[in-house]
Image: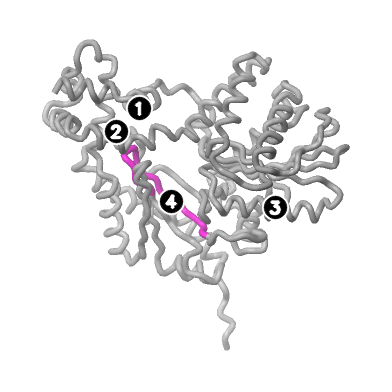
Amino acid sequence: MENGLRKLIGDRLFRDYHREFLKPKAFNTFDVLRYADYEIRHSNVLAWLLRPADSHGIGARFLEWFVDHVKERLAVAGGEPLQASDFEAANVVVERELDYVDVTIFFKREKCVIAIENKPGPASPEHFDQIRAYQEKLRGKYDDHTVRGVLLTTSPDGSVDIPGIAHVSWRSLHEAIGSFHETGEFRSGDVRAFVRQYLVLVDRWFGLTVSEGFKTLLDDHRSILTELRETLGKEGDDAVRDMMPEDLADYGDALVTLVKESRQNPLQLRRAVADYLKGRGCTTSFSHNPRRTHYWLTWTDAHLTETSRSLAGKDDFLHWGMTFTYHGVHVSFYLYQEPKAGREERSPLGRLREFIQATPINRQELSDYAVESHGFGWYQVYGQELLSNDEFLDTPPSESQDEVLQRLRGFMDSDESEYRRIDDYFRGLAFRPDDSP
């Protein structure tokens, strides 16, 4: 037993797990306001940092770094170089959501436009097509300007080759913002506190190593984890901690958490939920990412299929979905458009995004309904935790299934739930009075 424990605790993946999942949770404004996972908020902060005269107080220093980095990435991509720019505030205009582009930088005297498309996940082929389409549109609109495109994703710099487009990683932005923070560039105490919390948020947002290594950690130490789960079930948390060698006692809490998470079965939970939804007349489909232990379930019902057909001429435009992991269960509502090049604003998706922005689903909770690309044609309209990580840890696997199904049933059946609000909103959009005699 001790050899197995030492091997587990000594594994680099376990040390990563200990560092990322059990470091103390500090107060974070973004978490309190539930803004942590919205792409639109990250684009807002990026635009704020890029404006030389904005309230961050660092002038054009971040803008200069960003333009220099884009020049480097364009050189790697074989794109035409950017000319020298005047970073004086009067020469720079930074726009949000101009012609559907997340962030657009204008250098007035140089007649140069940099279009930035911000994606909350790894780069995918549809993203390349999207930024190319935006470039084409901007060149037509500003025919006397130089236009350059930037795709910002969580994929590392250099991992994606996009001819003529600068691919920039959020990891690089995180490092640059962190450097300005560490060297005291942000002079205001309020700004420093904001940036510190934002850096934590970004680190969590694209924190990939732990989730991708979690399945490997479970598989490599399956035997010892099985023994520990038996101890946990019979004797409780303290019995697991007591099994730790004295020199490894500091890892006791991490070990207990890992054992509790490892006992859950997200694949089995997904199967049970799918059976429940089929019993309600829903049509389900599945996908998963084995490296990150994410299991996805999407579903529609007869009403949603009819609404989808009316809005977009196809059955699969609107979906509800759930994500099952060892860390919790999440429910979302999605729009789906098959990835292809072209002008998004002319598609049902583009028109619907514009309508939702002008006519919000819930005016009291605008931030809950930011339509965000999740890659490969999927756009999330709404999302919430159905069972949080803390709740998952405290729920024995024998009770997890009943708890998830009970919460899902309440979510779908309550007249006050967002499920009903969203369903009513889209059915209202699709309603056509019967004008037959």
Q: Which residue is mark 2?
A: 217
| Span of residues in magenta | 323-336
Q: Tell me where residue 415 appears, x and y as whole percent.
A: 42, 55
N-terminal label among 2 and 4: 2
Neighbour class for label 3 at 10 Å: few (<14), some, many (≥20)?
Answer: many
Give the spatial CA distance, label 2 vs label 3: 42 Å
- Which comes sooner in the sequence, label 2 or label 3? 3
Q: Which mark is residue 417?
A: 4
The C terminus: image quadrant: bottom right
- Determine whether, in the image, residue 50 is placed left or right of residue 397: right
Residue marked by disc 1: 17
* C-alpha gap between disc 1 and disc 3: 40 Å
Q: Identify the secondary structure beneath mark 1.
A: helix
The amino acid pointed to by label 4 is: Ser
Give the SS element for disc 4: loop
Nearer the observer: mark 1 or 2; the answer is 2
Element assignment for label 2: helix
Q: Mark number for residue 276?
A: none
**Are the residues tagged 2 and 3 within 8 Å (C-beta)?**
no
Quick one: label 1, few (<14), some, or many (20+) residues within 10 Å? many
Of callouts 1 and 2, the N-terminal one: 1
